[in-house]
Amino acid sequence: MADRDALLFTDNEWTFERIGAVTERIGEVAERELALDTYPNQLEVITAEQMLDAYASTGLPMYYPHWSFGKQRAIETGQYRRGEMGLAYELVINSNPCISYLMEENTMVMQTLVIAHAAFGHNAFFKNNAFFQQWTDAEGILDYLEFAKGYIAHCEERYGIDTVSDVIDAAHALNRNGIDRARRPRKLSTRDEERRRRERAAFIERHLSEIWRTVPGAADSVPVAQEERFPRDPQENLIYFIEKNAPNLETWKREILRIVRKIAQYLYPQGQTKIMNEGFACFVHYHIMHSLHAMGLIGDGALLEFYASHTAVTYQPDFDSRRYTGINPYALGFAIFQDIKRVCLYPTDEDRAWFAFAGDPDWLKHIHFAMREFRDESFVLQYLSPKVMRDLHLFALANDPKADAFEVTAVHDDQGYQYLRTALARQIAEAARPPDIEVVAVNRWGDRHLHLKKMDPYPLDQSEAKKTLDHIARLWGYDVHLDAGDVVMISRAKAGAV
Amino acid sequence: MSVIVDRRNLGTRSSANQDRLHRRVRGRVKAAVEKLARHRSLDDMLDTEQPIAIPTKDLHEPSFRRDLRDAAWEQVLSGNRQFRRGDLIPKPQDGDGDGSGDEGPGAPDGLGDDEIAIVLSADEFLSVLFDGLELPNLRQTRTEDIQAEEWRRAGFVKEGSPSRMHIGRTMRTARARRMALRARKKEEFEALSRQAETLEEEIRVRQGHGEDTSIERFRLAEIREEMKVLERKIKAIPFIDESDLRFAHIDQQPRPITSAVIFCVMDVSGSMGDIEKDLAKRFFLLLYLFIHRQYRSVEIVFIKHHGEASECTEQEFFGAKEGGGTLVSPALQLVEDIMGERFPPEHWNVYLAQASDGDNAQDDNRVVHERALELLPQLRNLFYLEVNQDQESALLKLYKAMSQDFPELMTVRAKRTEDIYPLFRSLFSPRQGAGHG
C-alpha cells in the first residue's frame, strides 16, 4: 500500500468509531460512483442470540408472540449449536430508517462488507424497486408492527392466550393465500390504524348480516335473487374473504386475520425479488469494496478476506454436488447484474444480437433501470444472457411421471438459450407462488358452506390440504369444500369452532 | 445520515414465544417431566437444564402445498458437463418415486430433523412437576397464628430522631417552600422595579422640559423603600426551616410467616435396606422441593431412629445403617423437643415427614399415639410413608385411624421408585381427600 495512514483500519477488530468512519466513506462511494438513493441508515450491533431471535420472526424487529416463532427458534438454535448452520452476517429490514443488524462476532472487514451490502445495496433496492414501492410501506411498518403486537397482547389478555393462538394458527395456515396479487394494496398509514380498526369494527357489526339476511325485509323490498352467485367472481385472497364474510366470526378475530394478512403482504415482495435483491446487494458491495481498495482505504489483506466471503456467498454448486440446493439466488443475481455492466462496456456480437442496450457506455443507467423495474421472473426473462447460462452450465430437465427416465430438454447451446431462459423464469415464478386456491361460491341459502376450487394444474399435498381446510372451517364456522381437480375434500365445521 | 446503535445489552426477546411454545406442548412436556421424575434421581434432574425432545409433528403448521412427486415438472439446474438435448437420465430406482428429492423444487420444510429440543430451566421444570398440586388439608389456623411482626419502611414523617432524617426529602421540601414563598415577592419586586423605571424616565423627561417633578420623586422614593423592604423579606426566607425536616418512618407491620421447617424422620433399623432408603429419599426430596415453592425459606431437620432417635446430617441420614429394634416414639419426642427449642410453631410452618417400614415394637404404638396427639395440633402436616411391606403395619393402621380426626395426617405406601411420583401427585392433588395407603 502506498499510504498506510490512509487505511480506515489496519487490524481486524471493529469499533464503533471505525464503523462510523467506514459507513461515511461507503456512503460517499455509493453516492458518487453508483448514484444510490437510500433511506437513512440505522446500524444495530447485535449478538448471535439476538440474530437467532431475528431469524425466528422473519427478520422483523418486532412481532406478536406466537408458539411457531418459538419453534422456529428452537430448530435454528439446535442447528446453530450443532454447527449445521452458520448465521447470516447481517439482516436488513425494509423500513425507514433502514435497520441493518451487524453481528458482534464479525471482523471489521466483514462489518465493512455487510454495511456495503445491506445498508447500501439492500437499502437502495428497498427504496427504489417498483415492487417494494407498490407493495410495502417502509414508513409505516414499524408503527404497524407495534400496533399489531399491542392489539394481540390486548386480545390475549381479554380472551386468553390459547384462544388467540388458535386464531393465529388458522391465519398462518393461509398466510400465503392472503395476498391480492392483482391489486395494489393500500398504504399502511398506521398512525390511523387504531382509529380505522374501531371504525371497521363498528361497520362490520352494523353490516355483517347483510349478505346473510334471510329474514324477508319489508313487503315492498325486492328480494335478492337466490340464484345470484356470491362472490360474483372467484376470490384468490382467502384471508381477506373470510375476514370480510365469515358469518359468525367475532370482530377481534377478523382484526387478527387482518394483521396476519397485512404482515404477509409486507413480506410478499421479498419472496418475489430474492434473486434481484441479493444480486444487486452483491453487485453493490463488490463495487464498493474494490473502490475502497483502489482509494487506499482498505488494505490488501482486507480485500483477500472480502474475496473469501464473497466467493462463498456467490458460489453455485453443481446439480450433482451434495451441497446443491437449487439455483443460488446470490450467484444468479450477482452474475446477471455483473453481466449487464459487461454487456454495456465490453459487448460481443452475441450480446448485440440479444440486448438492445449492448455497448451503451452508461452502464449505471441500465443497472438502475433493471433494479427498479423488475422482479425475479421478469428480470431473468429480460436479462439472463447466453454468457451467464454458459458460465453456470444451465440445463433443463423434464419429468414425465410415466416414463422411466428424466429427459434433458435444453442445454446451454444456441438452440437452448431461449428455452432455458423461459423455463427458469417460469420455475422462479412458480416457486414464489402458492397453490392457486380460490373462493368460487358461498352457499348462502342452504348450509352456508364455503366452496373453494384449485385453479392451477399442479396436484396438492392432500394431507396438508385437509389440515388447512380444517383451519378454514374453524374460521368460517360452517363446512368447507375444496374442489382439488381430481378429488373433492370436505372439512366439517366442528361445534367448538374457533 | 447513519445512526449506529449498540443493541447487545438488550438481551433476547424470545421468552414470550418460548412460553407459548411450552404451553402448546404442555401435555408432552408434562409427560416427559413425569417420566424423568419417576426414573432419574432428583439431584440429577435439578442439576442441569433439561432438554425435552418434542416431535415436530405435534407442532406442524399446515398450508396449501404442491405435491410434485407424481406430477410432470420441468426444472433448470446448474453444472451440466456432458448432457445434450434429448439425453435420458434413468430415474433413481429406490421405489419411492421421489424424483424431486435431492435436486427437486419441492419446498424444503426447513425441518431437517423430526424433533426439536425444548429446554426447561430448573424453575420451569419444577412448575411442570408440581403443576396443579397444592398443600392439602392445611390445619385451619387463625390468621394471627401465621403472622409475625416486622419493621418496615412506611413513608416519611415530620418528626423523628436526627439519625433518621432523610436529607433528600428535606432538601426537596425546603426548595419547594423557598420557591413558593419567593415567587410572589419576586413578582411584586419586579413590578415595583418596572414602576420605578417608568418614573425615572418620566422625571428625566419632565426635568428636560423644566417642569416640576417633586411628586414623582416622592413617589419614587416611596417605591424604592418598598423595594428595600421586599428585598429584605426575600433574603429573610430561610434556606432551611424546621417545617422542612422529613424523617424516614418505619413501622411495625404484621407479615405472614414465610419460612417453614421440615422434620424428616427415618427408620434406620436393620429392616430398612438401600431400596427402602432410596424410596424415602425421593419422597423427602420431592416434598422439600414442593414445600420450598410455597415459602421463602425452608429448613430441614434430619432425625434417624432405631431404638433411639438422634438428629444427624443428610449424609448420615441416608447413609446410616444401624441395627436393632425399632421404636418410633423417641423420634416423635425428639421432634417435639427440637421444635420447642428452635422452631416454635407460632413462628414456623412445621411439617413432619416420616418414613418407616412400620415395624414398630408393639407396645410403642400406644406411646406413638399419645405423642402424635400432642404433636399434630402444632404441625401443618404429618406425612407418613410406609415402604416395602406386603401388609399394612400396625403403625400404619394407627395413623390411618387417627387421620379420621386429623386430616392433616396423611399416609402413603410405596414399593418401587416409580411409585413415588404418582403417589406424591395423588397426595397433593386438590380433589383428593384424606390420605390413602
Image (spheres, coloured by chain):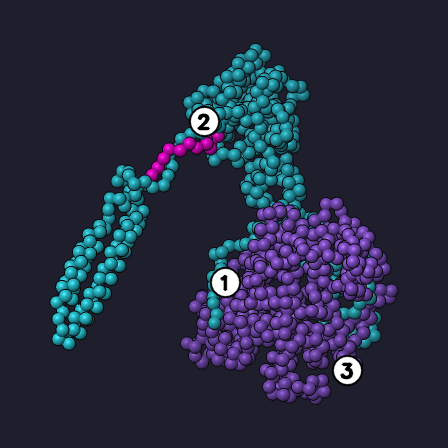
Mark 3 or mark 2: which is in front? Answer: 2
Residue beneath disc 1: A45
Upstream in the sequence, badge 3 or badge 1? 1
Q: Choose between B372 and B363: the one closer to the eye.
A: B372
Q: Which residue is mark 3?
A: A414
Q: Chain letter of disc 3? A: A
Mark 1–mark 2 CB contact (< 8 Å): no
Residue A173: percent from the left, percent from the top? 70, 56
Chain drawn in purple:
A
Which of discs 1 and 2 lies nearer the camera? The answer is 2
Q: Is residue A82 above or below residue B349?
A: below
Q: How far apart in space, not on screen, are marks 3 and 2 (Cα)? A: 97 Å
Q: Amino acid at mark 2?
A: Glu
Q: Which mark is residue B187?
A: none
Q: Chain of mark 2?
A: B
- Quadrant in the rendering for residue A262: bottom right
Horizontal and vertical percent position of residue B94: 81, 58
The mark found on residue B144 in the picture is 2
Neighbor class of circle 3 (other Cα within 10 Å; few <14, some 14-19, many 20+) is few
